[in-house]
C-alpha cells in the first residue's frame, strides 16, 4: 500500500493515523510518500520530495483519475481510494490479499548490496525495478503554520529514497544497490509494470 499524504493537508492527519495501524498487520507493507504540492498553503512538508509527487502522477494517468490528491492510498498499483474512507480501504486490502499473484523471485545478495530478479511472465509494455528506502519509525511532526497549524502529525514508514534501477522483461536480471543516504532505513524492491502499472513483486531486505 502506498499512502500519498502531506503535512499541510487538513484531512491527512486522521488518514496517517489509520494507515499507521494498517502497517502493523502481518503481510502488509505500507509506504508513506509525502508530497509537496500543498506547501503553498503555508507549511513546507519536512519529508516531501518532488519525485514522490511524480510517482503519484503516474498513477493519475494509469488509474484514469482527474488529478492527484491527498490523502490517497494505492494498493498493489491496481486500485486506489481516499484514505479517509476506511471501510473502502479495508475492503480493497482484503481483496488484494486474496488476489492471485505470480511474482518473480527477488533476492538480496552480498549482504544487501545487490538484488537478483528471476524469470516470470512480464506484462505487455514491460516493467521496471524500483528501490524504495523508508524509515520504519513512527515520527511526530509539529506543524507550525498552514491548515494544520498547532497540530502534531504522526507519520510512519516515511519513504526517504525512491530510485528506478532498470527494466525487467521477464528474464533474470541483477542490479547493484547504491548505499543508503541515511542510517536506519529499510530497503524494499518493487517490480512494477511500466508507467505506474500494477505491482508484480515485492521483496524487503532483512534487518541487520
Image (cartoon, grey):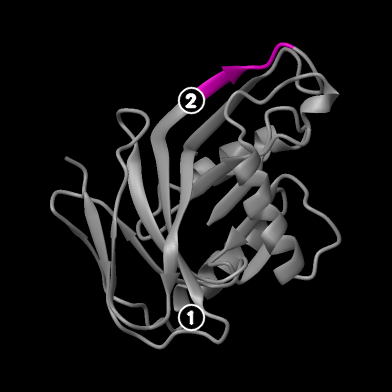
Q: Which of marks 1 and 2 is nearer the N terminus?
A: 1
Quadrant of the rendered image containing residue 171: bottom left
Q: Where is residue 61 in the image (x, y as percent from the top left)?
A: 75, 66
Q: Which percent across, then down, holds residue 34?
A: 62, 38
Residue located at (74% from left, 45% from top): 70
Is residue 26 depicted above or below 135 in this figure?
below
- In the picture of the structure, the residue carrying the numbered disc 1 is 99
The C terminus appears in which quarter of the rendering?
top left
Instruction: Specify few, some or many for label 1: CA neighbours under 10 Å numbering under 14, 14-19, or 20 or more.
Output: few
- Secondary structure type for disc 2: strand
Q: Which residue is drawn at 59% across and 71% down?
A: 197
Residue 96 shown in magenta: no
Q: Do the residues labelled 1 and 2 touch (CB within 8 Å)?
A: no
Q: Residue at x 61, y 45 (%)?
A: 52
Q: How many marks?
A: 2
Nearest to the observer: residue 90 or residue 186: 186
Q: What is the spatial separation of the Cα atoms under label 1 and label 2, in whole angstroms?
A: 32 Å
Tell me the magenta residue range: 140-144
Residue 139: numbered disc = 2
Amino acid at each position: 500500500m502506498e499512502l500519498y499524504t502531506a503535512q499541510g493537508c487538513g484531512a491527512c492527519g486522521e488518514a496517517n493515523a489509520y494507515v499507521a495501524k494498517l502497517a502493523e498487520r502481518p503481510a502488509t507493507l505500507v509506504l508513506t510518500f509525502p508530497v509537496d504540492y500543498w506547501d503553498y498553503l503555508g507549511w513546507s512538508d519536512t519529508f516531501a520530495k518532488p519525485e514522490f509527487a511524480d510517482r503519484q502522477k503516474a498513477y493519475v494517468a494509469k488509474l484514469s483519475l482527474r488529478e492527484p490528491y491527498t490523502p490517497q492510498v494505492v494498493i498493489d498499483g491496481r486500485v486506489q481510494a481516499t484514505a479517509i474512507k476506511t471501510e473502502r480501504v479495508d475492503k480493497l486490502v482484503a481483496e488484494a490479499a486474496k488476489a492471485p499473484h505470480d511474482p518473480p523471485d527477488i533476492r538480496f545478495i552480498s549482504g544487501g548490496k545487490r538484488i537478483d530478479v528471476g524469470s516470470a511472465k512480464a506484462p505487455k509494455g514491460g516493467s521496471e525495478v524500483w528501490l524504495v528506502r523508508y524509515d520504519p519509525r513512527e515520527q511526530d511532526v509539529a506543524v507550525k503554520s498552514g491548515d494544520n497549524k498547532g497540530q502534531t502529525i504522526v507519520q510512519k514508514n516515511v519513504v526517504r529514497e525512491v530510485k528506478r534501477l532498470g527494466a525487467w522483461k521477464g528474464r533474470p536480471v541483477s542490479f547493484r544497490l547504491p548505499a543508503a543516504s541515511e542510517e536506519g532505513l529499510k530497503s524494499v524492491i518493487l517490480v512494477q509494470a511500466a508507467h505506474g502499472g500494477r505491482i508484480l513483486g515485492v521483496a524487503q531486505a532483512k534487518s541487520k
